[in-house]
Image: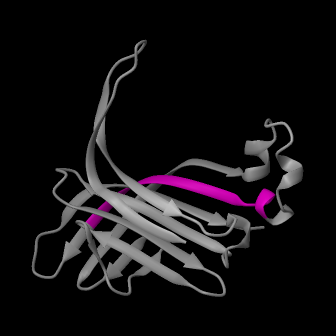
Amino acid sequence: MEWCCEAPAARATLRSESGPTSEGLGYAECIHFTVPPWRLPLHELRWGRWIAADASHSMVWIDWQGPAPRSWAVLNGRDLVAPAVTDDSVVAEGSRLVVSDRQPLRSRVLADLIRGIPGLTPLMPKSILALRETRWLGHGLLTRDGQPPVPGRSLSEYVVLG
């Protein structure tokens, strides 16, 4: 798997012919797999993104647990070395992001999501069909050595394979 965070704190505008225009902050990433996702050495996945309230800072992260565990984090467009990722924090190189007040957005099993797509369920391994994802919206506070704390919002997700 190759992961690249292309735009860690991008401004976006969404326009539709029938509705209002929406503007906000987000990020763009590119993930390239050389094997089917169900063959990845993965049991648990945590990922998330955080953007400062004033858009001055951003962080994205991935924590991959399984036979070959790995963690990635990008702060303000710069890769952080050896990040430690938990459900409520990302710590690396003198920076600490603490996520609090997480509100669940959704929790679902992949089988329920794809059930309505004819012919797809029989093609998927049972372990992938049992995949459960939970997503939260929360507040985040970034602290860095010698600098004032920076508040913002976070979106995080936890995925566990069945």
User: Residue at coordinates 11% horizontally, 70% vertically from top-left?
Assistant: 148
The residue stretch that appears in magenta: 128-141
Residue 80: image quadrant is: bottom left
The quadrant of the rendering that contains the N terminus is bottom right
**Residue 31, percent from left and from top:** 50, 62
User: Residue at coordinates 59% horizontally, 66% vertically from top-left?
Assistant: 33
**Residue 7, percent from left and from top:** 30, 55
Q: Main secondary structure of the magenta part?
A: strand
Q: Is residue 32 visible?
A: yes
Q: Does residue 62 sit above or below 29 in this rendering?
A: below
User: Residue at coordinates 20% horizontally, 61% vertically from top-left?
Assistant: 57
| Count of number-bearing discs | 0
Identity of the residue furthest to the top in this view: 18
Task: Report the side of 94 relative to 97 (left or right).
Answer: left
Identity of the residue furthest to the right in this view: 122
Toward the viewer: 123 or 72?
123
Q: Does residue 77 sit above or below 144 in this rendering?
A: above
Residue 162: image quadrant is: bottom right
Task: Report the side of 129 relative to 149 (left or right).
Answer: right
Q: Does residue 84 sit above or below 107 in this rendering?
A: below
User: Residue at coordinates 35% horizontally, 23% vertically from top-left?
Assistant: 15
Identity of the residue furthest to the front in this view: 34
**Residue 36, percent from left and from top:** 70, 65
